[in-house]
Image (spheres, grey):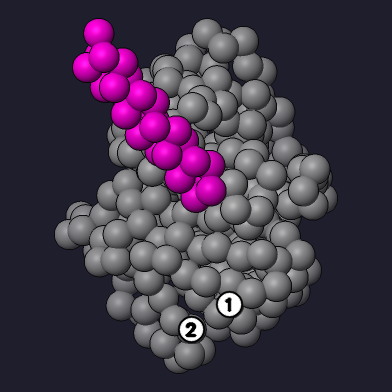
Amino acid sequence: MTKYLYLSLISLFLLGGFFFYQNAKFNDGKLHLVVCDVGQGDAIFIRTPNGSNILVDGGPDDSALNCLSNHMPFWDRTIELMVLTHPHTDHLTGLISVLSRYKVMHYVTENVKSEATSFKRLQAALAVQRLTAKYTTSGERIDFADKTHLLTVWPTNEWMETLKLQDSKNLGAEGSSLDVNGFCLIQLLSYGNFKALLTGDAGSIVEDKIAAEVGKVDVLKVPHHGSKTGMSEYFLSEVQPSLAIISVGANNKYGHPAKSALDLLSSHNIKYLRTDQNGEVEVVTDGKTTNVVN
């Protein structure tokens, strides 16, 4: 009996120590921005200073689950906000797995549909949790209690009106003048003096439209995995990030990141990190100073 009591006390002590460690690690009063290593796709996890969890895109498979488990306390099974920037499989598929493991409180996206099987599976998973999409356009801001803000800067209402001129099911199809990436959500994350621009798969045509409005940022999530059409000289001269992060898969068939994109970053003296070479990249800030962990 004494032996079992002794073992129980040791187990409780170890469990208490682990709980204390996780609480101190994940509730440090700082903003954590993690560009997850999900291969050729995007998944970005944000934990606010007060412990709210935000997931922007979910990657091409269930790899995002590892990212979440590494950056959330084991007892926390709630995602306060889930965002889908656009309905491409390399951004949405992982959200299906997340919905099966976590309780999601709010779901935000842009009002573009898809006929892809993965998108229909996502819609079904959202229905299980009785989640209704909140469509967002530029100027709409989500405020958290700890003064973290997520501002949508693209697309505009006027740009979304162009969808009415064509069948949205044919976005990107041969002969179509529209592209899903052109309607991709671009959002500005801010906390104190810290700003990060999350660009999804947007291209330089739309980024040039919002560059002056956004202004200088600390972190840029490089658009469209570093494709050759993702950034322009003008865009980078306006946003001037201290750090650029490229979410990209090793030896991908698209040739991302393009040499021209890397050369452009280098010509502006912008440090960049790549998930295919550096793994996941974590940025931690108290709103005044910023540290990079990778």
Find out whether the residues at labels 1 and 2 contact each other: C-beta distance under 8 Å.
yes
Secondary structure at badge 2 equals loop
Which sits in the foreground, 221 or 288?
288
How many numbered dots are placed on residues in this image?
Answer: 2
Residue farthest to the left, as pictured: 251
Q: Which mark is residue 241?
A: 1
- The residue at the point 54 percent across, 56 percent down is 33
Residue with the mark numbered 2: 270
Q: Quadrant of the N terminus?
A: top left
**Residue at image coords 69%, 44%:** 50
Q: Is residue 170 above or below residue 157?
A: above
Where are the magenta residues, as a range?
1-26
- The x, y position of residue 278, in whole percent, is 29, 66
Q: Residue furthest front?
A: 2
Residue type highlighted by circle 1: Pro
Position in image of residue 168 (x %, y %)? 57, 31
- Dot 1 falls on a residue whose secondary structure is loop
| Picture quadrant where residue 51 is located | top right
| Residue 83: quarter of image | top right
97 or 85, nearer to the observer = 97
Q: Residue at x 35, y 34 (%)?
A: 14
Q: Nearer the viewer, residue 115 or 33?
A: 33
Figure check: 183 above or below 269 = above
Q: Disc 1 and disc 2: Cα gap in Å? A: 7 Å
